[in-house]
Image: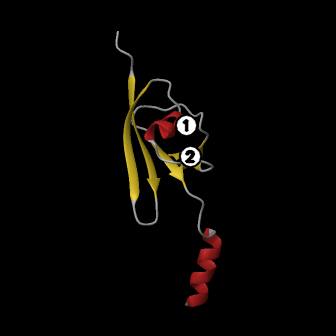
Amino acid sequence: MATAKLRVEVVYALAAEQKVVVLQLPAGASAGDAVAASGLAADGLSLGIGGREVGAGRLLHDGDRVEILRPLALDPKEARRLRARKR
């Protein structure tokens, strides 16, 4: 009997480029397993799925897209204030 496989993507978006790694992982794999298998460095960074932050232990489903989340360069509220001041 064949072991079930999950097809997932691991994504790390930088300012000028987006790195995407497509993986086949065994059923029961976690978000942390996917990032480790991708080879993309995520030390100390948060992970997300579907735009929501998740823990590294979150179990994956077929088709999930694991996002490596970078810290924000500027708080969104502060960015809005700066734009308003320029107007």
Residue, disc 2: 47
Amino acid beneath label 1 = Gly
Amino acid beneath label 2 = Leu
- Tell me the SS state at disc 2: strand
Q: Is residue 79 left or right of residue 51?
A: right
Residue 3 locus on image (x, y percent) = 39, 16
- Above/below status of 76 relative to 7: below
- Tell me the SS state at disc 1: helix
> Which numbered disc covers residue 83?
none
Q: Residue furthest bottom?
A: 87
Residue 6 locus on image (x, y percent) = 40, 29
Res. 7 in view: yes
- Above/below status of 77 relative to 51: below
Quarter in which the C terminus is drawn: bottom right
Name the residue at 38% across, 36% down: 23
Labelled pair 2, 1 in contact (Cβ < 8 Å): yes
Q: Nearer the viewer, residue 85 or 35?
A: 35
Name the residue at 61% across, 88% down: 85
Quarter in which the N terminus is drawn: top left
Residue, disc 1: 32
Badge 2: residue crowd in 10 Å (few <14, some 14–19, many ≥20):
many
